[in-house]
Amino acid sequence: MTISRHTCRICKTADNHPTFMGREMMFGTREEFVYFQCNTCDCLQITDIPENIDEYYPTDYMPHTLSETTNKGINWVIRILQKQRCRTALFGKNYKLNSLLKLIVDLPSALYESPNGVSSVGRIITTTGLKSFDERILDVGCGIYSHWLASLEELGFTELQGVDPLIPADQNHGYVNIARSELCDVSGKFSLISLHHSLEHIPNQEETLILIEKHLTHDGVCLIRIPIIPSHLWKKYGTNWVEFDPPRHFYLHSLKSLKLLANKAGLEVFDIQYDETAFEFYGSEMYARDIPLTNENSPLFNPESSLFTKEEMNNFKTLANKVNQTGESGRAAFFLRKTLLSSG
């Protein structure tokens, strides 16, 4: 770590900030990039955003590859009955009908799935306060296939839209429509706008949050899932922290910097759910051993990986649960809504 003068893009503090040298390790090019951490808001950010940033999202970048596990072949009658059961589970409606239907069909597995490793889809929906299946939902920076939107479709939601400027072409998967475009190209308002590990990839942070505020209904919610600092793993591994991810991650927010950014856009954080997983532990350990994340023996891709013992992998899960409980997590889901002054 060294010290050099920079201006923070979040709080505008011009000062001598601590700087760090990070390496590209997802694909293992080991190209180096300079980051600095603001003395005022604690946001860790890349010093210079590469002009050729598209080159760091090759065709085999995971979010830009189509999932092989799409929900196909489910009997439409079963789907209709499950939707009725989800209407009760999510919105508290039709309890009498549900008491009968539960003898016929189970609730869909998507209700209990945890896209963040901690909070289930059902818990997230309850936190956002959605009231019906026909509310409009937008996923920003969702890649070529949004597992989040696919899960919502399985529950019964139908107004599902995604945007990502880096995918090769528009995508359509049932009720899920994903456009190869920017947030600024989107029209209309949404009851829920989500950014699942995409905000950290976006250069214009304040502009993005302002656009989100404008696209939210008066009681709409924005869900932002991002890596955060300080965290147990940042303190332990430093620039080998897997979530550092130079140069794709332009910003690693602190709680302070994220709340500051939200307030500038007329938004406020009303709930935080920590969602560290075992991935952050074994990924950081791989980088410390100079092993790229996309290595053929990586646990992320290879269920038979020999890099870590079963005991070590179980320990990573235990540690992830621990840091989530203590607030030392390196990942969090932030729930934002309009402030009283901006709503209307």
Image: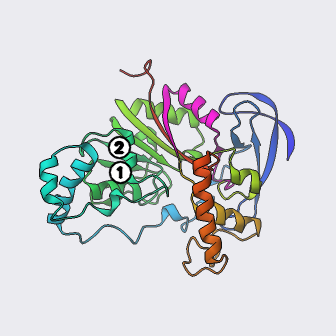
The quarter of the rendered structure image containing the C terminus is: top left
Question: The residue under label 1 is which amino acid type?
Answer: Gly
| Residue lying furthest top | 341
Q: Secondary structure at mark 2?
A: helix
Horizontally, residue 214 falls left or right of residue 157, namely right
Question: The residue under label 2 is which amino acid type?
Answer: Thr
Q: Position of residue 92 (x, y in %)?
A: 23, 43
Relative to 309, residue 259 above or below: above
Residue wearing tag 1: 122
Asked if the residues shown at circle 1 and circle 2 are in contact, with their CB atoms under 8 angstroms apart, the answer is yes
Q: Position of residue 263 (x, y in %)?
A: 54, 26
Residue wearing tag 2: 126
The magenta stretch is 244-273
264 falls in the magenta region: yes
Residue at x-position 57% and y-position 70%: 300
Q: Position of residue 46 (x, y in %)?
A: 71, 45
Mark 1 residue crowding within 10 angstroms, few (<14) / some (14–19) / many (20+): some
Residue at x-position 69% and y-position 44%: 230
Q: Quadrant of residue 285?
A: bottom right
Q: Position of residue 23 (x, y in %)?
A: 75, 59
Pick whichever, 182 or 281, lies toward us: 281
Horizontally, residue 290 falls left or right of residue 131, namely right
Q: Which mark is residue 297?
A: none
The reply to whether residue 51 is in sight is yes
